[in-house]
């Protein structure tokens, strides 16, 4: 679905099957998700994990949406499920509902840099609202000033949307300082230097 990994979302829990790291047997994985939900139908994490599995591995977006809705009904303030559902809705062209879910995710966890960064990307790419996107990027950087993904995303926004190469370079440098051995961070900075 193409979002930045959200703490507590698929792949970051201790379940024995994760769409982020499949064992290669999707049928068995799906059976485990179903059993987890049967064991506890009110487990928002299990419902959200199954929703992500359905979208990412089965391409069953309708059932994924149903699972996200169940997960959010159980825990209306789960920023991970709200953000994942927002991404699904955005991918399906339901932009107004996607934005509603992003806003709810930000309200539920206003200090979550990943949620803020994902909402910033939505505002940039879908809404073309660069003012609010810039605000969300700044809030994401303030929330987690050493997160290289957040710093790189803001640097790309500054370069590609605002044309502010000086501030973009500052963000790239901060990302490199935060993780000087990260090949993605280094490559992103190198790409910036080539095109600047």
Image: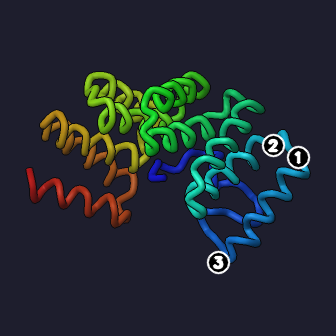
Q: Horizontal placement of 179 versus 195: left or right? A: right
Closer-to-camera residue (29/151): 29
- Taking the image as shown, residue 1 lies to the left or right of residue 134, namely right
Q: Residues within 10 Å of mark 2 (few under 14, many from 20)?
A: some
User: Relative to residue 76, is residue 32 drawn left or right?
Assistant: right
Counting from the top left corner in percent of width and height, residue 41 is at: 85, 43
What whole-number distance in Å separates the C-alpha atoms at marks 2 and 1? Answer: 6 Å
Identify whether 180 is placed above or below 145.
Answer: below
The residue lying at 16 percent from left, 33 percent from top is 162
Q: Position of residue 167 (x, y in %)?
A: 19, 36
Q: Nearer the viewer, residue 133 or 28?
A: 28
Circle 3 packing at 10 Å, graded few (<14), some (14-19), many (20+), is few
Secondary structure of the residue carrying tag 3 is: loop
N-terminal of the pair, mark 3 or mark 1, is: 3
Q: Residue furthest right?
A: 39
Q: Label 2 belongs to which residue?
A: 43
**Residue on which the image places disc 3:** 24
Q: Which residue is mark 1?
A: 40
Front one among 140 and 62: 62
In front here: 124 or 7? 124
* Mark before the other along the chain sequence, 3 or 2: 3
- Up the image or down, 22 lies above or below 143; here it is below
Q: Secondary structure at mark 2?
A: loop
Q: CA distance from mark 3 to mark 2?
A: 25 Å
Q: Name the disc covering residue 124, or none.
A: none
């Amino acid at each position: 679905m193409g979002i930045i990994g959200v703490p507590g979302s698929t792949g970051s829990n201790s379940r024995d099957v994760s769409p982020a790291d499949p064992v290669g047997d999707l049928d068995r994985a799906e059976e485990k998700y179903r059993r987890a939900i049967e064991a506890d139908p009110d487990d928002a994490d299990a419902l959200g994990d199954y929703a992500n599995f359905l979208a990412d591995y089965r391409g069953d977006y309708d059932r994924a949406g149903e699972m996200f809705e169940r997960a959010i009904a159980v825990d209306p303030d789960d920023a991970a499920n709200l953000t994942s559902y927002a991404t699904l809705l955005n991918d399906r062209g339901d932009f107004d509902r996607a934005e509603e879910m992003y806003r709810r995710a930000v309200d539920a966890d206003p200090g979550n840099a990943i949620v803020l960064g994902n909402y910033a990307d939505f505002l940039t790419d879908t809404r073309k609202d660069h003012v609010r996107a810039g605000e969300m990027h700044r809030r994401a950087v303030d929330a987690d000033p050493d997160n290289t993904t957040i710093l790189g995303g803001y640097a790309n926004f500054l370069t590609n949307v605002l044309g502010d190469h000086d501030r973009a370079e500052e963000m790239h440098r901060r990302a490199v300082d935060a993780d000087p051995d990260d090949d993605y961070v280094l490559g992103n900075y190198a790409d910036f230097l080539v095109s600047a």
